[in-house]
Image: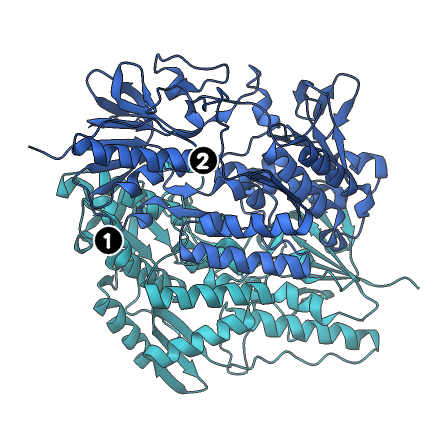
Chain colours: A blue, B cyan
Amino acid sequence: MPNKKVVIIGGGFGGMNVAKSLANTSYEVTIIDKANHHLFQPLLYQVATAALSPGDIATPIRSVFTKQKNVKVVLGEVVEVSKTDQVVQLAEGDVIPFDYLVIATGAEYNYFGNDDWEKSAPGLKSLDDALRIRERILVSLEQAEKIHDLEDRKPYLTFVVIGGGPTGVEMAGSIAEIAKRNMMRDYRNFHRNETNVYLVEAASGVLNGFSESLSDNALETLTKMGVHVLLNSPVEEIRKDGVQLKNQFIETPNIIWAAGVSGTDLTNNLGEETDRIGRIKVNEDLSIPNHPNIFVIGDAAYFEDEKGKPLAGVAPVAMQQGKYLGKLLKNESNGTNRKPFKYVDKGTMATIGRAKAVADIKGFKLTGFFAWLIWGVIHIFFLIGFRNRFRVFAEWIWHYITFKRGVRLIAHKENREVET
Amino acid sequence: MPNKKVVIIGGGFGGMNVAKSLANTSYEVTIIDKANHHLFQPLLYQVATAALSPGDIATPIRSVFTKQKNVKVVLGEVVEVSKTDQVVQLAEGDVIPFDYLVIATGAEYNYFGNDDWEKSAPGLKSLDDALRIRERILVSLEQAEKIHDLEDRKPYLTFVVIGGGPTGVEMAGSIAEIAKRNMMRDYRNFHRNETNVYLVEAASGVLNGFSESLSDNALETLTKMGVHVLLNSPVEEIRKDGVQLKNQFIETPNIIWAAGVSGTDLTNNLGEETDRIGRIKVNEDLSIPNHPNIFVIGDAAYFEDEKGKPLAGVAPVAMQQGKYLGKLLKNESNGTNRKPFKYVDKGTMATIGRAKAVADIKGFKLTGFFAWLIWGVIHIFFLIGFRNRFRVFAEWIWHYITFKRGVRLIAHKENREVET
């Protein structure tokens, strides 16, 4: 009989781990992704803040599977999944059949129904997003340098990050470092004290989901770094020229969205039950009801642990689910029964800035330099491809010594014209 | 009396060297550039062929002058120069006065009056150009991977470089390496032998201006690498789907322009005498007739050496002219008379591929590995900024050992949609 076909939609942490675990099996694996690269998203904010180059945190999906001959990589966008015919349809028209389907499409930013906000407040999901944000920040500083009136240039020296989760905290922290640190010495017309960085959060604290002591510590650290953290401040409106909060308007072209997420068009149109942020509710074995051969993993899936607590949309969950699914499919071919998925929480951490982080590892709470060191080591370790690890490590040493941001490049003319 | 104002248009090799030579003088220096970075153009083709990242060959102009406080950097485009009022006008409206003006705006690609060719056959002058070409090549390979009919996918595996100068030779050489080497192992549906790389040159040889033996050697090396070199083949038409030559049509979306150059709008509208490719004819001291305080250097200038031979548009000429001008302006402040500019030819070289290059250093002709080594050392040496040198060196070692192209990223969605 012919080899079974496993189709994986999405080359993120989940999808990549499924494919890798199926090495040396008879399965014919196809990974479909809109981008040609696997992205190490936990470090995406460092591209957005000119600390790393795109090439440092992204690896061509193909190159990961050069030697694994049972994996085929397709650059394309899946527009429809036919659960009964067992095929997926690409935007370009191609139709790809599957025996098993893994939906690992991640999540998208959700503007609470105000999609027009996206133009003024880009989210941070792709390399493209990161480069746009980087250019927006750099162009804004160039603008400020040209304006001689203190009041007139204030908006260009103001930065607002919306959402106090790990990404928001990391963005605000590193923008504060850029805005308050050496890089500012390169500008002649304004002083770094003129810069303002805001972190806007609707809830009563940052890093919700972390232990209270850690989220308090993060808040304190951010404040020490000069970030204005505005809690209990839901956003009422986002315009091209600023953010409207309940009782103040912050004028700036530099708005970054790190708040709510939702499902993708693909998962939304799948006709399965989702939670309020569009994650598909999956069975114990990560399959969807009535379709034991269709699985959803990572940020796209809603899964409750033993305590009934839904798993967070973080890399470790996606990785473990990917590996679990690889194992499950191997056993499947030997007719072994499926065991339910169990998530092993190895801890949570967030970095706030240079030599500043918070970590909660199996109950051990760490802060400051040591937490940051662990954060760095773990992230280097999980980076795919020796080359990237080596480069990122070198870059970090370099930043640590010099405080310099290496890749402050405005590469795209048309983009810049949009902004200036 | 107030300090004299030196305004430099262009942050390339010429402009940067003028500004650097004016360190510790009383001159108030302003560098105006459309981009925020100095670009190491001799390595731009390596970004276009996914060997290096933009951050490896570009440095923010500001960061170069962090410590040199008499230099101000302005991100902007000069639309008009008023020679009599001694001011330059920016597109954004700002008006900047000068006592001395240095025009170092380089050259642009010239499509011999067929500007519509540019869309189908981008040149290689900016980071943006390089990233577009890189994406075009990568997207084309992804397309080929999806097409199962050998004939139908042929165009996507065909690459045409137009122009047999150093840039054209370097582009063709490294595309051939990509197309014939390991990277192709990542694709499942086609074999690397299916790829075709053409180098199209109107003249009877490549690398004109180099000694005959070297240009012959380059031709031989390219052919050995599998490049189809078409000599005496002027381009008749460029279309989105291919290149029309006198007696053949090459069907491909992958066309790269490395042929003629011309002046920029700025130099064309300056009302000065130019040569046929738009370079402004300058006096012995690089000033323009009747305006001893306005200078033109680098690719934008037409200057004949003692033998009446015009200097080529290469980095060393621009660097030496920049340093010369810095010295001239220093002397000027002491009332010393101007000495004429003299170019010291340290040799010409071009790289063709991994461990393959040709060099002509003061009459010593070198080829192959040794020439390549010298090429590498010299280019590393002239890279601005330790960080970049370190990264580029590391990257080259990495490529040399692994044959791998690191940065094969398709970052820009909209761009990709254009192409696919």
- Observer able to see residue A270: yes
Residue that label 2 marks: A344
- The amino acid pointed to by label 1 is Arg
Who's the residue at 26% across and 63% down the image?
Answer: B232
Q: Which mark is residue B185?
A: 1
Q: Residues within 10 Å of mark 2 (few under 14, many from 20)?
A: few
Q: Position of residue A59 (x, y in %)?
A: 40, 48
Q: Position of residue B301 (x, y in %)?
A: 57, 65
Quadrant location of residue A359? top right
- The amino acid pointed to by label 2 is Val
Q: Position of residue B22 (x, y in %)?
A: 75, 70
Q: Secondary structure at mark 1?
A: helix
Q: Is residue B388 above or below residue B326?
A: above
Q: Is residue A107 above or below residue B304?
A: above
Who's the residue at 42% across and 25% down the image?
Answer: A300
Q: Secondary structure at mark 2?
A: loop
Mark 1 vs mark 2, foreground winner is 2
Screen quadrant of the C terminus of chain A = top right
Quadrant location of residue A248? top right
Q: Position of residue B222 (x, y in %)?
A: 27, 68
Q: Is residue B265 above or below residue B299?
A: above
Q: Chain of mark 2?
A: A
Who's the residue at 36% across and 37% down the image?
Answer: A11
Q: Chain of mark 1?
A: B
In the image, is B152 to the left or to the right of B130? left
In depth, the one of A101 and B246 nearer the eye is A101
In depth, the one of A35 and A13 nearer the eye is A13
Screen quadrant of the N terminus of chain A = top left
